[in-house]
Image (tube, rainbow, N blue to C red):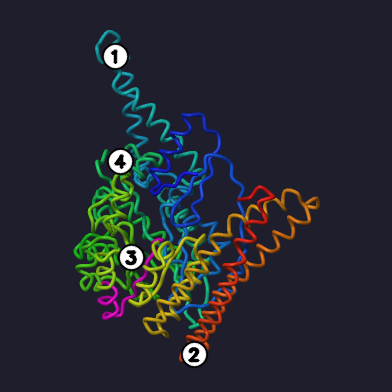
């Protein structure tokens, strides 16, 4: 097994092994650090009843992209904190918006190029004829036009195709997560407007016509800078029309969110454009949020509050822009951990703390939509102490994130500092024991599945014992926090000792069980 951090590094490792003749790869991205096996690996899973998850004061939301995913997973969280338009554009639309806006012009351009081509053909012996400067562009343009016609079949108005498909995707997500919360409010569906970078827009059909080379797309022509630029503003307006259409269908839980907004002046102009298109803050309950992912968003948080109703912290971009380090730079990854250029660092904590304080003083909400709270329990504790309003996680970490948030809220609000330390230490012990038995338990369960009715009696007994101790440890950690919440905190030591005794028995039992399963080839 190889361990790696950063998607670019993972891709390079896979390509390297493919050149060596590797046929199978298994990638596990279910936890904070991706893991890669250079072979087929059997896997195990546990089913979770989401309705049984404890409720939290801090909203635990889910990140969504593909509209179909919202129909199956959207009803469980209290809303979505990040729905990315990029997924809808990539999967459903597939065409660069400017190629749709200027489709008729592209067709005329193709005709002009053909005329030039015919004139050159008449000059058989000229240098122009042999160099044929128009042929390559003619072929590429024809292919683009034909593809657009094929994809947009049934739509004479190509702009309407973009608006309609985008609105349908947004509406599907918003309908999927529609939920009346205990306080009577409708759970929000926060839709981040497009944040493709230049190289990503270039990959769309027709993108080659409009997107040039950019040395550092991460810091270039992206986010709100596109929206206010004459080359892209019409495309941005199509997104606004799609948002408006979806809300007019009754999905008033949709909250548009702006990405990568560099300055208050940029924010002011964006809000003006939105108002011109009929999206006015406060009308029909419309809120507008902004990503807090640039140091200027933090430094000028008080001014940004004049234009937005809430913030969503993009911890990855905020971290790399605060420290001036690319998060996918292979050489920098070990340094990021060694020298604290990471999310759970003093600089980022101070930034987040300042943002929450400034926003709350002005009655603005603050959430976070990165994986940091799920991957780092210590950072989650910090966020809860600071009073963050919501945490939005990928669906595969939602259950764990909800449980950890519930735990943290109780511990931080009820216990003394000394008792907090002991409680977190106890929970870490429980979680580590579960992690230690997860793999051998999974292997046993997979062996039983393969053998089915022919499974050995000893194998079945061993599997049952591992299942029982897995459930017992889970119940111990849950019941301890539940009793802390409901009981007399003056009797903390007595309660702690009671549950510590239970978990110690599990600690003693696990090595015995592990020894017993060696006969099945599990180590």
**Which residue lies at the image location 58% right of the left edge and 70% below the top edge?**
474
Q: Are marks 1 and 2 in contact (CB under 8 Å)?
A: no
Q: Relative to 326, does residue 214 appear above or below in the rendering?
A: above
Closer to the camera, 106 or 382? Answer: 382
Real-space CA distance between mark 1 and mark 3, rounded to the nearest whole angstrom: 57 Å
Q: Is residue 438 visible?
A: yes
Give the residue number, with chain letter if any, for mark 2.
491
Residue 295, given in percent of the width and then of the height, sits at 22, 62
For label 4, the crowd category at 10 Å Cα-Cα, with few meaning under 14, some 14 to 19 and many 20 or more, is: some
Q: Are marks 3 and 2 in contact (CB under 8 Å)?
A: no
Residue 286, given in percent of the width and then of the height, sits at 37, 72
Give the residue number, with chain letter if any, for mark 3.
313
Q: Earlier in the sequence, mark 3 or mark 2?
A: 3
Real-space CA distance between mark 1 and mark 4, rounded to the nearest whole angstrom: 28 Å
Q: Earlier in the sequence, mark 1 or mark 3?
A: 1
Real-space CA distance between mark 4 and mark 2, rounded to the nearest whole angstrom: 68 Å
Residue 123, given in percent of the width and then of the height, sits at 28, 12
Check residue 129 in the rendering and tell me which mark sits there, or answer none. Answer: 1
> Can you tell which quarter of the image residue 512 is in?
bottom right
Q: Is residue 244 visible?
A: no
Total labels: the figure holds 4
Q: Secondary structure at mark 3?
A: strand
Q: Secondary structure at mark 2?
A: helix
Q: Earlier in the sequence, mark 4 or mark 3?
A: 4
Q: Earlier in the sequence, mark 1 or mark 2?
A: 1
Give the residue number, with chain letter if any, for mark 4.
210
Real-space CA distance between mark 1 and mark 2, rounded to the nearest whole angstrom: 93 Å
């Amino acid at each position: 097994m190889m361990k790696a951090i950063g998607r670019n590094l993972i891709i390079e490792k896979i390509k390297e092994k493919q050149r060596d003749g590797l046929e199978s790869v298994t990638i596990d991205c279910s936890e904070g650090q991706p893991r890669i096996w250079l072979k087929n690996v059997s896997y195990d899973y546990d089913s979770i009843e989401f309705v049984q998850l404890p409720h939290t004061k801090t909203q635990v939301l889910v990140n969504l992209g593909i509209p179909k995913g919202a129909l199956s997973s959207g009803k469980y969280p209290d809303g979505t904190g990040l729905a990315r338009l990029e997924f809808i554009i990539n999967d459903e639309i597939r065409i660069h918006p400017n190629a749709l806006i200027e489709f008729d012009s592209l067709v005329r351009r193709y005709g002009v190029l053909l005329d030039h081509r015919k004139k050159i053909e008449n000059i058989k012996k000229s240098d122009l004829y042999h160099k044929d400067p128009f042929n390559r562009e003619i072929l590429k343009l024809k292919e683009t036009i034909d593809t657009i016609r094929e994809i947009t079949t049934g739509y004479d108005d190509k702009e309407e195709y973009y608006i309609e498909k985008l609105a349908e995707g947004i509406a599907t997500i918003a309908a999927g997560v529609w939920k009346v919360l205990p306080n009577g409010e409708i759970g929000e569906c926060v839709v981040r407007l497009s944040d493709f970078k230049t190289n990503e827009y270039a990959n769309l059909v027709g993108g080659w016509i409009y997107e040039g080379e950019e040395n550092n797309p991460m810091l270039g022509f992206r986010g709100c800078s596109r929206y206010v630029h004459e080359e892209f503003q019409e495309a941005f307006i199509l997104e606004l029309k799609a948002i408006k259409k979806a809300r007019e269908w009754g999905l008033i839980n949709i909250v548009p969110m702006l990405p990568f907004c560099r300055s208050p002046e940029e924010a002011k102009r964006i809000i003006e454009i939105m108002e011109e298109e009929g999206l006015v803050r406060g009308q029909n309950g419309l809120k507008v949020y902004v990503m807090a992912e640039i140091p200027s968003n933090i430094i000028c948080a008080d001014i940004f509050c004049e234009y937005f109703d809430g913030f969503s912290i993009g911890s990855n971009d905020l971290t790399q822009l605060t420290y001036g380090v690319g998060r996918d730079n292979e050489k920098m990854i070990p340094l990021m951990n060694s020298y604290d250029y990471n999310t759970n660092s003093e600089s980022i904590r101070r930034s987040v703390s300042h943002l929450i304080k400034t926003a709350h003083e002005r009655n603005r909400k603050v959430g976070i939509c990165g994986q940091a709270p799920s991957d780092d329990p210590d950072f989650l504790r910090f966020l809860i102490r600071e009073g963050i309003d919501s945490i939005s996680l990928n669906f595969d970490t939602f259950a764990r994130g909800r449980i950890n948030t519930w735990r943290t809220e109780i511990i931080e609000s009820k216990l003394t500092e000394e008792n907090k330390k002991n409680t977190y230490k106890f929970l870490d012990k429980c979680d580590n024991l579960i992690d230690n038995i997860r793999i051998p338990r999974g292997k046993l369960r997979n062996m039983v599945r393969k053998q089915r009715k022919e499974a050995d009696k000893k194998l079945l007994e061993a599997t049952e014992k591992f299942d029982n101790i897995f459930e017992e440890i889970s119940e111990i950690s849950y019941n301890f926090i539940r009793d802390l919440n409901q009981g007399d905190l003056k009797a903390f030591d007595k309660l702690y000792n009671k549950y510590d005794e239970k978990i110690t028995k599990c600690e003693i039992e696990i090595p015995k069980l592990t020894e017993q399963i060696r006969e099945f080839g599990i180590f």
